[in-house]
Amino acid sequence: MKIRFIILFVTLISSSLIASELNKDMVALAEIYRSFMFRNNPTESSLKEIDHIESVELEGSKAFIKECISSENKLTDAQFLSLPDESTMKYIYIIRRINWNLREAEPRNNDTLISELSNRSIQRYELIDNYYDMLFTGIGNKNQPFDLSELDFKINEYKLQDNTEKGIFFLKAMDLCGTSIWGYMNIVKPPNYKKALAFIEKFPKFNGQPYYQYLDFSFKDFEMQIEEGKDPESYKAYYINKYYDCLLSHLACLSQKKRQKEERMDLLLGSILNESNYYPYSQKKEVLESLFTKAKR
């Protein structure tokens, strides 16, 4: 009986030490990510610190974080466009939230936060959203100047299990693209259509086709908290609305010159601008309806 107690005690101590080391390594990755996720280039010592992290559970997370902070990265390679295993996605999810916590004026205890998130059941779709949000944020921050024109995202090759997961990939990629033209279309007065169109011409292809020909939006919807401080909301309503804004901006750019009339009609008829069943997801439903009515006339 005494021997069993000793074995149990040693096992508990060992498990506690392993968990403590894992927590420490996740915090270290979060701190490095926080320091270099934008335009700052990682120091050689920071990259070595990542390499020296020994928690075997974090091997995939280490590789991903290193790419996200490096200007010469492989984020657009199939290796990282493809989903990692769900455990790795969960660790990446936690690391990102530690990073957010570190930015607070009065951060919570990181061990408490890690314990809370580790024990929480997080839907797979939310883990995927987080993964691709970080990936495309890394591409946007580090792969400068913006130019994805040589990329052709083969969505069926990235270990995505259903149409919802494929939809998440597409919408996160297009969220980055939409952000690249937002200022030219919404801040500058009048809009700088020429600059915006120059960026649109650098958008990637999907499955061998122009971005706007992606039509697979009949996937199952789900809810998650998208904006901090707000209640969970429809994923499709939030991101398809933003995607429609991008399409409308593209259409407006092509409307500036008569010689682009054919391109304008290709966009109008070849995209979900022509799919009225998706209009309810847009906050500009009336604009969409009127545009298509005018085009048919």
Image: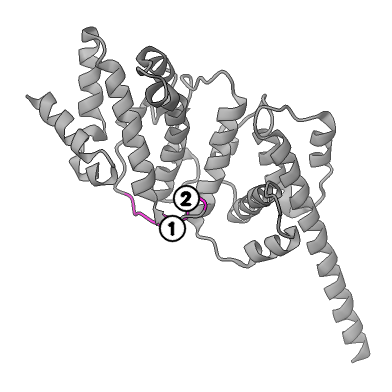
Whether label 2 touches label 1, CB < 8 Å: yes
According to the picture, the residue beneath numbered tag 1 turns out to be 232
**Where is the N terminus found, in terms of image quarters?**
bottom right
Q: Secondary structure at mark 1?
A: loop
Residue 80 at x, y percent in the picture: 59, 37
Q: Give the camera-side residue of 3 and 244.
A: 244
The magenta-colored residue range is 219-228
Q: Secondary structure at mark 2?
A: loop
Q: Nearer the viewer, residue 13 or 40?
A: 40
Q: Looking at the figure, which quarter contains the C terminus?
A: top left
Where is 3 relative to 99, above or below?
A: below
Say which residue appears at 76% left-offset and 30% top-offset: 42
Q: Earlier in the sequence, mark 2 or mark 1?
A: 2
Identify the amino acid type marked 1.
Pro
Residue 193 sits in which quadrant? top left
What is the quadrant of residue 49 in the picture?
Answer: top right
Q: To which residue does mark 2 refer?
A: 226
Bin the neighbour count of mark 1 within 10 Å (Cα to Cα): few under 14, some 14-19, many 20 and up. few
Asked whether residue 222 is drawn in magenta, I would say: yes
Assess whether residue 270 is covered by the magenta stretch: no
Q: As displayed, is residue 288 above or below residue 101? A: above
What residue is drawn where x is 50% and y is 47%? 129
Could you tell me residue 103's position as x and y percent? 68, 46
Which residue sits at x=78%, y=51%? 25
Residue situated furthest left in the rendering? 297
Q: Amino acid at mark 2?
A: Ile
Tell me the quarter of the picture where residue 174 sits: top left
